[in-house]
């Protein structure tokens, strides 16, 4: 080991050059992987996420189906006509301005049907959630709050359950606190921290007064398929279109999509492309470093031949080059992780809005493990070729 370190110190310029190349590429790979892992690769944080579906009104005008909302009447019709779903929930965005603290705070919220929590199979860590009995005008002044809000504004007080909190539009009785990390809808720029019951306004039960603002999420029954759910949604759309032909274009449909595809699909392609490009950049960097080390090894051929004549085995001499490459890559990954921690925060701030789960991007154990694995892989990759060439030269010198 001392011989390896002495060898690296003997050519400081080459050593610094290699460390710089490896640091930049490993840091770039770490930042990219942290983003892709959090947004694309990890499954949704719900029980059996493959059973969850999103329903949107695709109006056939080439706008993303996931962005097209439904009306209350469409929600009711789909709930009645899709027996392939065990539950269907409606979600409408909103906000509340909380009062009573040091200063008012605007908090993003969501009005949701009580079925949401059963659909996602998520339970509160304190208290309970609201039920269908709260989806009646006059009973809806209750709320479930998020873990971050509970910690930030109420100091994690377990006595928050059963207490009324002041909002600009009136008091809300807190029924429960959701687990840490729970958020729905799953977007980054407006994370809901309060959930209140969705009550269908009387006027929106009339066909002439429909407003489209609901996002629908459901869970397939065991054994039900996405194709079956889509067929039933098409049948519901056909019935509604017959009653209201002016509201539905010939190309429109109720699109049933797996929730993970609806959330991740719009960004999966370009994110995986960026990850592939960075991986190729890492390979190119390894090739460049291998060439530098090969040139350095050739320059040291006389030294290595003398050491071989003094009794050092060829395997030991050649393996010292791999040890050098592993030390270089290990040092580079330490610096790269520091650089990546800054790069991750900068990347989160620069990502386009509405990127799902962008708030979960972090230098966590998975990302750390991937960075260490990349360092070992690159060390071996750019160390093997010079080692092979070095063994050839030692053999010929012997």
Image (spheres, rainbow, N blue to C red):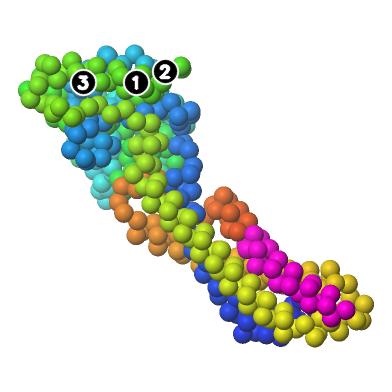
Which residue is found at the position 11% from the left and 16% from the top?
243
Q: Position of residue 48 (x, y in %)?
A: 48, 28
- The answer to the question of whether label 1 and label 2 lie on touching residues, with beta carbons closer than 8 A, is yes
Q: Position of residue 254 (x, y in %)?
A: 25, 26
Residue for badge 3: 237
Magenta segment boundaries in residue numbering: 375-398
Nearest the viewer among 324 and 252 is 252
Residue for badge 1: 229
Q: Position of residue 73 (x, y in %)?
A: 18, 21
Quarter of the picture holding the N terminus? bottom right
For residue 181, above or below residue 224? below
- Separation of disc 3 and disc 1 at Cα? 12 Å
Q: Secondary structure at mark 2?
A: loop
Q: Secondary structure at mark 3?
A: helix
For residue 26, above or below residue 363? below
Q: Secondary structure at mark 1?
A: helix
Q: Where, by quadrant of the figure, is residue 107 drawn? A: top left
- Separation of disc 2 and disc 3 at Cα? 20 Å
Magenta-drawn stretch contains 210 = no
Which residue is found at the position 11% from the left and 26% from the top?
247
For residue 166, above or below residue 392? above
The answer to whether residue 286 is visible is yes
- Separation of disc 1 and disc 2 at Cα? 7 Å
- The answer to the question of whether label 3 and label 1 lie on touching residues, with beta carbons closer than 8 A, is no
Residue 224 is labelled as 2
Q: Where, by quadrant of the figure, is residue 313 drawn? A: bottom right
Q: Is residue 85 left or right of residue 80?
A: right
Nearest the viewer among 26 and 183 is 26
């Amino acid at each position: 080991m001392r011989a390896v370190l002495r060898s690296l110190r003997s050519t400081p310029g080459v050593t610094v050059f290699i460390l710089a190349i490896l640091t930049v590429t490993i840091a770039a790979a770490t930042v990219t992987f942290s983003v892709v892992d959090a947004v694309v690769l990890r499954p949704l944080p719900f029980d059996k996420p493959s059973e969850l579906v999103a329903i949107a009104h695709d109006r056939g005008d080439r706008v993303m189906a996931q962005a097209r909302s439904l009306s209350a009447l469409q929600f009711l019709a789909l709930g009645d006509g899709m027996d392939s779903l065990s539950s269907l929930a409606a979600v409408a965005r909103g906000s509340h301005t909380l009062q009573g603290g040091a200063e008012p705070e605007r908090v993003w919220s969501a009005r949701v049907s009580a079925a949401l929590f059963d659909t996602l199979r998520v339970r509160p860590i304190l208290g309970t959630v609201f039920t269908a009995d709260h989806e009646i005008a006059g009973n809806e002044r209750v709320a479930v709050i998020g873990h971050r809000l509970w910690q930030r504004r109420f100091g994690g007080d377990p006595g928050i359950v059963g207490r009324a909190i002041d909002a600009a539009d009136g008091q809300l009785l807190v029924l429960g606190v959701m687990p840490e990390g729970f958020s729905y809808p799953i977007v980054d720029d407006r994370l809901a921290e309060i959930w209140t019951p969705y009550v269908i306004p009387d006027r929106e039960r009339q066909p002439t007064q429909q407003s489209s603002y609901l996002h629908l999420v459901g869970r397939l029954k065991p054994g039900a398929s996405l194709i079956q759910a889509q067929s039933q949604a098409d049948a519901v759309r056909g019935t509604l279109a017959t009653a209201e032909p002016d509201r539905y274009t010939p190309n429109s449909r109720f699109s049933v999509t797996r929730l993970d595809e609806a959330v991740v699909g719009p960004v999966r392609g370009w994110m995986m492309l960026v990850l592939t490009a960075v991986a190729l950049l890492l390979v190119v960097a390894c090739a460049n470093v291998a060439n530098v080390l090969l040139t350095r090894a050739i320059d040291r051929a006389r030294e290595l031949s003398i050491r071989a004549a003094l009794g050092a085995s060829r395997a030991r001499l050649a393996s010292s080059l791999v040890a050098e490459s592993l030390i270089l890559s290990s040092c580079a990954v330490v610096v790269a992780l520091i650089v990546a921690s800054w790069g991750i925060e900068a990347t989160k701030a620069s990502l386009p809005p509405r990127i799902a789960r962008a708030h979960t991007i972090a230098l966590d154990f998975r990302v750390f493990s991937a960075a260490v694995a990349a360092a070992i892989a690159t060390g071996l990759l750019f160390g093997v070729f010079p080692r092979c060439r070095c063994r050839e030269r030692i053999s010929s010198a012997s």
